[in-house]
Image (tube, rainbow, N blue to C red):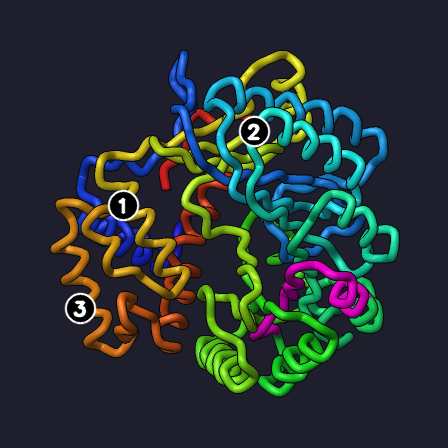
Amino acid sequence: MKSPEQWLVRHITRTVRRSLVGPEQRWVFEQPPQGWTPPPVNRTSLYLHVPFCRHFCPYCPYTKVPYREALLEPYTRAAIAEVDWWADRIGPAEITSIYIGGGTPTLALDSVARVLMHVRKRFHLTGDICIETNPADVNDETVKRLHDLDVALVSLGVQSFQARNLAVIGRTYQPDIAERALALLAESGFSSVNVDLMFALPHQTAEDVSADLCRAVQLGADQITTYPLFTFPYTSVGEYLRLKAVRMPNLHMRKAHYRMINQWCTEHGFERVSVWGFKRGGIPRYSSVTRDGYIGIGPGSGSHLPDGFVLNTFDLNSWIDAMDNGRMAIALRIPFADKMPGWWWLYWRFYDTRIPLGAIDGILGHDTPKVRRWLRVVEKIGLAVRNDEYLELTEPGAFWLHLAQNYFALNYVNTLWTQARREPWPKEVFI
């Protein structure tokens, strides 16, 4: 049964969606129709999902399975087959970036190497390769292997350099492990090293967050991604927090921490490059999500195509079986009505916190007047300011967008992923 708050969010969501995108867009994921095939694509990005983990963090919602060496060969074989599946249908597209996430991708670098080799064979790779890793998995051999794979950007999931905060989120290593891992990555010649840090954790103070930011920069991080503790019904985090008698932080605490992070980053020469992310200098921007199009390889991977969004089955065995038998691993698809691609683009420009005003006419078309009216309101109430050809979110604007993501965008993800985790091949999911 939905709470009054959930009903209110659902009602507001439907009203806003209908007002912006129109009634033609159906907000339902369904099994792809018989004979469906993705449209040709000239340029796109690629996401490779590696689901293996040795330890499961209770706050992590992504598709993951316990690491077992026996699973590596079936996984690799299926991932290579999926690369072929996409190449056979969309053509030899230019791949402008590769993002490798998980799970813990560095647990399966032999597999990653074989898949990347096949990507290069079937596509035209022109962009950077980015990879996630965890502190306990970083050593000299890991660094060597990453350079052998031509990885340019590395993201280290530190979350906190303080033992009590690591314990709250179920991390089993001590801070010195994270410190050594970050220092090693920072001195190893990558184009950029990003650090993930969490804020607004239970009993965490603003001073704790500031200390984590300082330590990350002292150890060599040139990008920082900060985010609060999210809860999803399909993760173990809810049960974990109940067992620990921990309450989620209130709005005041979250806002105070976010304001402090923005102020600290400004004072230390970091610019905001997304709602969550900050970088320093002219290094390439690390981002796991802000790509205008991408294809997904692996269980639970999504793909953003010109005609809509598709999602692979979350179940590892079902995904492997589909690939081994020449079938499509895509479980769900939501086609885009005519207006939806433009609004999707605008949503991610808000996530970037910079909206290029000159591009709106060509992308939003007939909806341009409506968009400009909305943007004028956003500017008038102080959530954004004009800067040359861009409308840039202010710190309050970025915070309220982050909060809206919690209540609306993550609500869609929650609904979709809950069903996708229950059934390998759901018939339909309304969001």
Residue 325 covered by magenta stretch: no
Q: Residue at x 55, y 38 (%)?
A: 46
Residue 187 covered by magenta stretch: yes
Element on which disc 3 rests: helix
| Dot 1 or dot 2, earlier in sequence | 2
Q: Give, as a three-letter code, the residue at label 1.
A: Gly
Q: Residue at x 54, y 84 (%)?
A: 264
Q: Is residue 369 above or below residue 64?
A: below
| Dot 3 or dot 1, earlier in sequence | 1
Which residue is label 3 attached to?
Answer: 376
Neighbours of disc 2 within 10 Å: few (<14), some (14-19), many (20+): some
Q: Residue at x 52, y 66 (%)?
A: 277
Mark 3 and mark 1: span between their CA atoms? 18 Å
Neighbours of disc 1 within 10 Å: few (<14), some (14-19), many (20+): some
Q: Is residue 74 above or below residue 261?
A: above
- First to last magenta residue range: 181-201
Q: Give, as a three-letter code, the residue at label 2.
A: Phe
Mark 1 and mark 2: span between their CA atoms? 27 Å
Which residue is label 2 attached to?
Answer: 123
Element on which disc 1 rests: helix
Asked whether residue 420 appears in the rendered view, the answer is no
Q: Give, as a three-letter code, the residue at label 3.
A: Arg
**Of 363 and 313, the residue lying toward us:** 363
Element on which disc 2 rests: loop
Q: x and y percent of residue 15 in the render? A: 21, 52
